[in-house]
Amino acid sequence: MRSGKTLRAAAVLMAAALALAACGDPALDRDAYHAADPVDDIPPVKPVDLRKLIWPDKDYIGLAYDGTIDSGLERRKAFGDLVGRPHNLLKYFEEFGGDFKDEENKRIWDAGALPFADVEPYDGTLRDFADGKYDADIRRYAAEVKAANIPVAYSWGHEMNGWWYPWGYCSDSGHLEKDGSEKSEDDLGDACKDESKENTPEDFVDAWKHIHDVFTETGVGNVIWVWSPNTAQGDGLPPVKKFYPGDEYVDWIGVSGYMYKDKDNPADRSNIFMGVFGDLYKELRAFTEKPIVIAETGSTADKAKANDVHRLLKGSVRFKDILGYVWFDVKKVEFGNETDFRVEARADAVKRYRKDLTTPWGQKLGFDPEQLINDD
């Protein structure tokens, strides 16, 4: 349980967040998009109204998967049947440089979910993006998003404060062993190799702003911009604020953090939600009031997985400025080990998930995004 002092501080932060939602956030003004010139032969369109989706009355319940968008839709249906409720935020991963899959994304939207594109810039450096090297690709993709004219949550370069992606930051954990010696070439984090080791937080900020500016110049008004740091802290990492491009460039904070089995203290997981997300939550609230979505999470905790599920769902509802979560329902090889984040890996976790969604507070999780923005 949190202390009274922590509860009072959280209450103040929640009140401020709710006040911001009530008053309106000037960064959500989409009028600037209307004046943009049409691109190529794409006619200007009136953007869908994103405001209710950016800060809805209920919470998102999301799912991330591996595979194609169509296979993700199949997984979404199966997962919804399993836990008793369809999930309304469907996250997929794609490498930068391809086309926006308009028909597939429209199928997500028509199925009752908000598409969430997590775009990974494996090629090129942050400085390349900031300097405009990939503007043609960005502009083409942006024009395709605009033409689709459905709401899309868009995250570029997620977990930029980690050392495991080439667009990340080379912190101590990325290049040093626990004894302080240098890691071998095979064990180096991707952010510590080749040109990536020169990445700075300022480079990421410049790249993000430039991409956002190209979208805006292209007249795109149907994107929810999701800036997605990881919960990683310490080990030589700069403060996460240094990676932040500013409120005018961000709609959601998309936090990634996982609930791993604690070998040193496997029994006590009563405070797992705050244990994973609490420190970053406090750090974020020191410089921004933007709404938070837990953009990736999962549990590896075996017998404690059911408790982790409960703490996640309960925590998402309890914090009014946290708009929901995306469960990473994947069994994957991670850092050389097979890691099973799937809820269905344990029957008791599925049972708890299903039960929690039937509670009075669980009714606040999930809604139809299309109905929400069309409801007068």
Image (cartoon, rainbow, N blue to C red):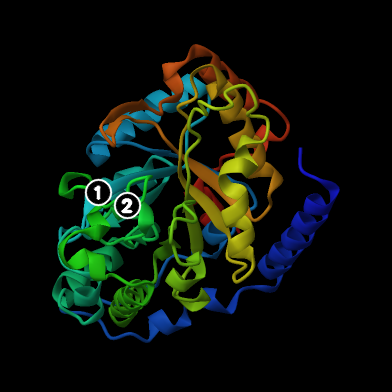
Residue 195 versus residue 251: which sits nearer the camera? Answer: 195
- Say which residue appears at 66% left-offset and 43% top-offset: 317
Q: Quadrant of residue 169?
A: bottom left
Circle 2 packing at 10 Å, graded few (<14), some (14-19), many (20+), is some
Q: Is residue 184 above or below residue 122?
A: above
Residue type at numbered disc 1: Lys
What residue is disc 1 on?
183
Say whether marks 1 and 2 touch (CB < 8 Å): yes
Mark 1–mark 2 distance (CA, rounded to whole Å) = 5 Å
Horizontal and vertical percent for residue 95?
20, 54
Regarding residue 224, the answer to whether it shows in the image is yes
What residue is disc 2 on?
176
Residue 344 versus residue 239: which sits nearer the camera? Answer: 239
Precedes in sequence: disc 1 or disc 2:
2
Q: Is residue 333 left or right of residue 115?
A: left
Residue type at numbered disc 2: Leu
Horizontal and vertical percent for residue 364?
66, 40
- Give the secondary structure at mark 1: loop
